[in-house]
């Protein structure tokens, strides 16, 4: 354990994946509020600005007793662990099983509460492994003895997000930008700092609940892309293509950037309106105003999923 641990008892807050995207923003807010944090991670980053401010322990699902020991004495687990796409031995089924191990370790450690990050519209009956797996992971949380808050974001913007940033990067970099289908399906993005605030506030509650974490604006995907293009001054030509051709184009771009840009299942989920909520908005920051304020920097660099999670390890906490 590094920073390493100044005390034998864990801080009040345990966060999985503090050096990943969602976890990092939760940790930043906890530190700003004067809280101490220990992260469980399989991807430590000694160069992170957070490295000297938090304790670091392994997120090793093969050693559940050690996981429980790392959480002993804490009160709240913020769980951001998941896998965006399957790669090698890392599958959604493995991620579900690992979530169950983590939840049972939290029970053994005597934690008070779990704040669990899920996704909008998960379903046990979904044909998409990501959304079905998310529903199964939620069930592990609900079946535990601990009080819990399950937050269901649709997609993020802000910081080093993947989708919005990389749409902007492509609009800056390629002469033609492809939209699968008619682009009339919807998305409801949430600002990552609003999401972090919802998570930390949820930890203070005592009742168990599930809540969609979504911003105040809903966009047709075609309108979203054109908004980003107009805001950053892109001259890329926007075209509508069949979904199958979109998957091929994503693989071609992925070859050049050495990343998985957009999977076939992600295209399917996008077109199936799974990234929008039927509930009232729960966050306050709108994408349009944020884009206007950040037009000079959004999409300037490409955000790589593989570089973020798979270069140093095959285990992912994001």
Image (cartoon, rainbow, N blue to C red):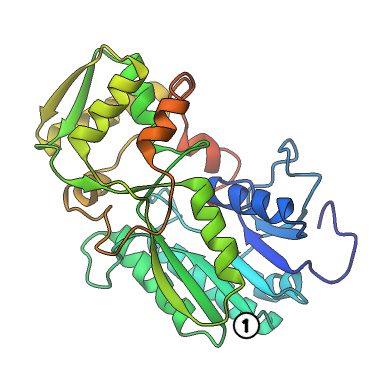
Rendered position, 185 above or below 303: below
Instruction: For mark 1, give the secondary structure.
Output: helix
Name the residue at the bottom extreme: 145
Q: Position of residue 45 (x, y in %)?
A: 69, 41
Pointer 1 local density, CA inside 10 Å: few below 14, some 14–19, many at least 20: some
Residue 247 seen by the camera: no
- Residue 301 left/right relative to 175: right
Residue 270, position as x, y percentages in the image: 23, 47
Q: Residue at x 69, y 57 (%)?
A: 39
- Give coordinates of residue 13: x percent, y percent: 70, 65
Q: Quadrant of the N terminus?
A: bottom right
Front-lying residue, 306 or 190: 190
56 horizontally vs 284: left or right: right
Q: From the viewer's perspective, is residue 56 above or below residue 143? A: above
* Residue in the image at 30% along x and 49% along y: 188
Q: State the residue position of label 1.
A: 107
The residue located at (43%, 34%) in the rendering is: 290
- Please indicate whether residue 111 sits to the left or right of residue 266 in the image: right
In the rendered view, tell whether residue 207 sits above or below residue 30: below
User: Is 62 in front, or is 250?
Assistant: 250
Instruction: Give x and y (percent) for residue 158.
Output: 48, 38
Q: Quadrant of residue 15?
A: bottom right
Outermost residue to the right: 6
User: Residue sitting at 60 percent across and 70 percent down?
Assistant: 203
Q: Nearer the viewer, residue 45 or 36?
A: 36
Q: Is residue 224 visible?
A: yes
Note whether 302 is above or below 243 in the view shown: above
């Amino acid at each position: 354990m590094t920073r390493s641990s100044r005390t034998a008892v864990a801080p009040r807050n345990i966060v999985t994946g503090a050096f990943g995207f969602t976890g990092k923003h939760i940790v930043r807010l906890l530190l700003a509020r004067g809280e101490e944090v220990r992260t469980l991670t399989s991807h430590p980053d000694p160069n992170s600005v957070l490295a000297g401010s938090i304790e670091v322990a392994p997120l090793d699902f093969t050693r559940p007793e050690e996981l429980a020991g790392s959480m002993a004495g804490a009160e709240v687990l913020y769980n951001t662990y998941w896998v965006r796409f399957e790669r090698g031995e890392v599958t959604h089924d493995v991620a579900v099983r690992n979530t169950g191990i983590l939840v049972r370790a939290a029970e053994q450690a005597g934690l008070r509460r779990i704040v669990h990050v899920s996704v909008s519209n998960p379903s046990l009956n979904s044909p998409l492994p990501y959304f079905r797996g998310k529903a199964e992971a939620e069930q592990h949380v609900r079946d535990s003895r601990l009080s819990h808050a399950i937050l269901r974001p649709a997609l993020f913007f802000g910081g080093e997000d993947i989708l919005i940033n990389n749409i902007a990067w492509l609009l800056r970099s390629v002469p033609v930008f492809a939209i699968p289908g008619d682009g009339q399906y919807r998305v409801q993005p949430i600002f990552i700092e609003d999401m972090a605030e919802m998570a930390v506030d949820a930890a203070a509650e005592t009742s168990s609940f599930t809540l969609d974490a979504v911003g105040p604006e809903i966009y047709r995907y075609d309108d979203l892309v054109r908004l980003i293009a107009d805001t950053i001054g892109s001259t890329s030509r926007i075209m509508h293509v069949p979904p199958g051709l979109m998957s091929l184009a994503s693989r071609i771009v992925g070859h050049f950037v050495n990343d998985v840009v957009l999977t076939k299942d992600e295209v399917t989920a996008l077109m199936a309106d799974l990234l929008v909520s039927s509930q009232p908005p729960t966050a306050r920051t709108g994408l349009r105003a944020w884009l206007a304020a950040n037009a000079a920097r959004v999409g300037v660099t490409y955000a790589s999923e593989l570089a973020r999670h798979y270069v140093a390890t095959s285990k992912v906490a994001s």
